Image: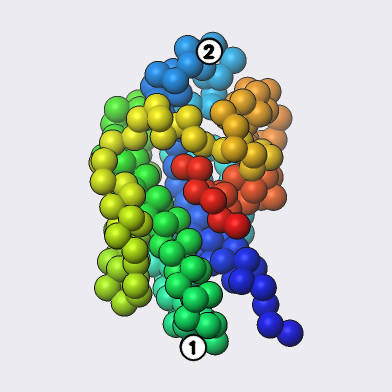
Amino acid sequence: MKKPLKDNHNELIHLLYKPLIFYFPRKLWTDLDEMWMDKKFDSVFNTVVLMQTNGDNYILDDGASNFQLLGKASVLAENIYELLDLKVKLSSEAFSFLCERYSLSVAFYKHVSNWMLEHIKDYISDFSEETLNSFKIQKVAFDEHWDYIEKHFLIPDHVVNYFDNAQLNKQDVAKIPDFITGDQLLTGGIFEKLAQPIKNKKKVLITEEEAEKYLLKTIFDLQLE
């Protein structure tokens, strides 16, 4: 039976953020609302998190990360193969829509991965050379992936220019859908939940299902349905 277009899209998006290394820069949230200065959110911000290929995620604490990110380019290449197959199988209209939605998500990850690497010294007080290299590997992987799809697939101008501003700002943050529910609301639930004491030895932040709900929506109010 033919797979729904939405399922094709979701499967492509899954491979964009598995694996992923990231952090929440506190200043961007406090520029939006000073409530995020509360001490109960100290463990949430300016902390490096690693999402593994299997979807598990935890606070890195300068642990090993390169072995996860070294395969990032290969994971993204799987999406290229899938897109090429879908280009043959789908109608021109369906593929154009899928490609536009997917490329917008790639543009987002490219934008944020570049920003996180550029500003890691501003927000992470103590990080290892391996952690820094993981951010570099991730940046290069997303840059090269974007370059390929821009060259080989028809990407609308509004997608190419969507992230012209190299900086993130509070307007961007205000559009982030709720990390837990996926609703397009100011993020409250994620921080309320993460502010609770972490009992798990690996300091698990959120479940794979919760992370998927967040990242499948992408972060900047990008409608995927």
Q: Amino acid at mark 1?
A: Val
Vertical placement of 189 versus 225: above or below?
above
Element under disc 1 = helix
Vertical placement of 126 versus 37: above or below?
below
- Could you tell whether 169 is left or right of 34 in the image? left
Q: Which residue is mark 1?
A: 88
List x then y, in percent, for residue 169: 35, 30
Q: Which residue is mark 2?
A: 35
Residue at point 40%, 50% (across, down): 108
Element under disc 2 = helix
Q: Amino acid at mark 2?
A: Met
Q: CA distance from mark 2 to mark 1?
A: 51 Å
The mark found on residue 100 in the picture is none
Residue at point 49%, 88% (across, down): 88
| Label 2 crowd (10 A; few <14 / some 14-19 / many >=20) | few
Label 2 vs label 1, nearer the camera: 1
